[in-house]
Every structure is written in C-alpha cells, then in structure tokens.
Image: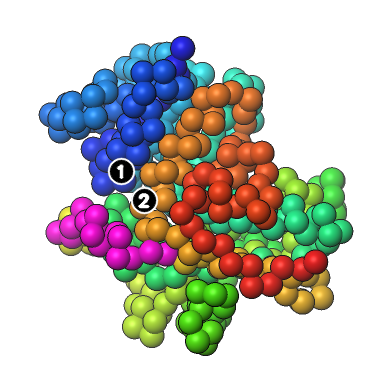
Amino acid sequence: MSHTILLYGATGFSGRLIAGAAAKRWSAPAAACRLVLGARESAELKQLAHRHAVDYRAFGLDDRPRVLRELRGVKVLVNAAGPFAWTAERLAKAAVEAGCHYVDINGEVDVYKRLDDLGRFAAQRQVAIVCSAGHMSTTSDLLLDAALQHLGNKGIVELGTVRFAMSRVTHVSRGSTESALRSLREQVTVVREADVSCQGGPRWQPVLWHLPVGALERTFDFGARGKHAGAGKPDLRIASAVNLVDTLTARVQAMRHGVRVHQIESYMETGTAARVGYQLGAFAAPLLSLPWVGALARAQIALLPEGPTAQERAASPHVLLLEIEDAARTPVIDWRLAGPNIYDVTAEAVTAIAERLAEGGFSGWCTPAEALGPRLTLTEVEQGEPLRGCRLEQRVTVG
C-alpha cells in the first residue's frame, strides 16, 4: 500500500519543480508513495495535476477544520507555499494535529525558530517535522553530518569554528527574493558557545548570538584544487555573514553528535556592490516594517520573473564550502561541494526526505540529514540522495 504525500503550494515555482521530481519518482504503479497536489486556487492546480496524472486538493488555510479534513489519510505534508511566515506555522500545527509528518522549504530564520517549539508536540504524536529541507540547508547538513562523524571517529570532539559559504546565486525566484527581503535585519544570527551552568545540564552550550550586518566578512577559496582545477589557482571571493537557516540546523546537528562547538557562521558570496547593497538594506530594514513601504517593495518584486528557466538553471551550478577548525584554530575540514542549480537540488531533496519519512521511524524535530539517515560516510556523500550528481572535493580532511 502506497503512502499519500500531499504537496501544498504545488503551483508555485519551487512547487512545480518538486511536483515534477516527485511524479517522476513515484510514477510506477507499485511505487512506495502516491503524490497529491494541493494549492489555494483550483484552475492552475487542476491543469498541473492532469499533466502529472495525479490527484489534487484545492483549499485555503483560513478554514482550519477544512485543512484538517484535507489532511486525513495523508502520511507526509510537504509545504512549498510561500511566504512561509504566513503558511508554515499554520500547516505545521495542522499536520501535527492530523498525525502526519511535515516538511517545508522555508529559508527564514524567524520561521525556523517559531517552528522548532513544535518538536516536542510532534514527538508526542509520533510524527516528524523537517523544516528548511531546501538546497542549502539539506546539503550543508549532510556535509556537516558526515564531517562530524569523521572527526568523531578521529577523537576530535571539540571544535573551534564551523563555517558554511555558498557561491553567489545568479538567478533567483520571486519567492526567494521575497524571503530575502523579509530576512533583512540590522543583525546577523550566529552561534556562539556560552556558559549556561546556572540552567543545569552541560555547562557550555551553543546559543544564538547576533552581530551587526557587515561585521563578519571573510575571503573563501571557491575554486577546485584537484584534477578538475585546471591551473590550480585559488578562486578567492569575499563573502558576508548572512541570516541562513543552516546556522541553526548546524547547531542542532552538533548537539546531536555531542560535539562541543565554539562558533557557527554562514556566509554568502558578495561582490562590492552586493556588500554595499546588503548593508544599506540592513539599515533600511526598520522602514520595511511600515505597511506602505512593504507594499511598495512587494509590488516591485511582483514584476520579476517567477523563477529561472531550465536553461538558466542548467547554466548556473552551485558551490558550497564547509570549513571546520579545531579548538586550536587548525583547519581539520575544508570541503568543496559543486553541484547542480539550487532549485533542482531542492526538488530532489524534498522528494527524498518525504519518502523517507513516509517509511516510518521518525518523530519530533529532525534535521534534513537525520531524515535522510543513516549517517553518510565520506565515500557515500556523493552517492546518496540528494547529492547524486554533485562532486565533493576534500581539500583538507584530518586523518
């Protein structure tokens, strides 16, 4: 008997990519899962469901009893309906009450922090919540999981700084632009180790910290160094610390491994113009809370293309770096993951995570890597879902 996976927000840009990947994956009559598409409006949803030969359910989120009825018989609810500040909490709570697993592709730190409080309620209901199962969060979590497992096997259980750095995204969707706009803050969320002995439990724990925008900038080498490196010259680019969910997910992963980490930071490549614009945007963030300013900004975003075309995605692969230092600030991990476009990886990642949850055995708050478990070894990183098609270069690996 196949498990029902409901994809809500199927008519959005990322939703359509996920629908295509899921329909292809579960197209066989004896497939483990059965895809059902969901969205607010029925006309476009009906056409999309007909194209993929799957069922559909059209409903809004204002009528909670109706939402709960639509979730009957659903094993996993996948939320691709942005803005997630408006949909994630309502759908996650409904999923927990209905007794089905919840997955989303949210990329906003504030939304992540609101949802993680639902973890204990989900555990009581024997269902799982996997927030932020998109490209950056999933790939960084898989890399960190493999790296921490490797370091643990080498007896390294105290780390200095964990850093993620992602290359510039040249083509972004309208939804990603809206999320970036809502994520603009005067401060950047990082993780710092703090003494919490007065609260009981382990004395030193990684806690959320905030630094001014622009206070953290570093130069990263985004170039390959192995047989694909050509002349082998460094490809040095400046990156700024940004508000990414990866920072929060890494904190959960470190605690899961029982590793002591002093600092966790996430960066994004930024040229000179981008850094200036980023800092100016941060200073203007309070203005965006004004209704008329926010409405004007959203009106401008609405004029943008919905998302990159297939040709644009094929022409814009992505690079993710993971750097880890030990407690003495000696590099012990320097990995470079080169892979397809972020939106294509997101579609594969969400589909794989939804299928794993449907198979059972998960409950409570789960990171993407935990849901895709068991933990990957170094030789399995490129072979396992959803990193198949990516190329991992271990520029530094202790031991």
Residue plotted at (52% across, 44% down): 385
Magenta stretch, residue numbers: 303-318
* Residue 380 locus on image (x, y percent): 63, 50
> Relative to residue 40, is residue 142 depicted above or below?
below
Magenta span includes 306: yes
Indicate the position of residue 198 as horizontal and vertical percent values. 84, 51
Question: What is the three-letter code of the residue carrying label 1?
Answer: Leu
Q: Is residue 372 magenta?
A: no
**Mark 2 element type:** helix
Look at mark 2 in the image and give the residue it sits on. Answer: 344
Residue 302, by quadrant, is bottom left
Residue 217 in percent (x, y) is at 53, 80
**Along the horizontal axis of the image, is 349 left or right of 218?**
left
Q: Name the residue under label 1.
A: 17
Residue 35 or residue 219, whichever sits in front = 35
Q: Is the magenta stretch mostly helix, strand or loop?
A: loop
Can residue 289 be seen?
no
Q: Is any atom of residue 352 visible in this view?
A: yes
Identified by mark 2, the residue type is Asp
The residue sitting at 61% across, 56% down in the picture is 143
Residue at the spot 80% in from the left edge and 66% down from the top edge: 399
Q: Residue at x 29, y 28 (%)?
A: 38
The answer to whether mark 2 and mark 1 are in CB contact below 8 A is: yes
- Marks 2 and 1 sit apart, C-alpha to C-alpha, by 7 Å
Q: Residue 242 or 75: which is nearer the viewer?
A: 75
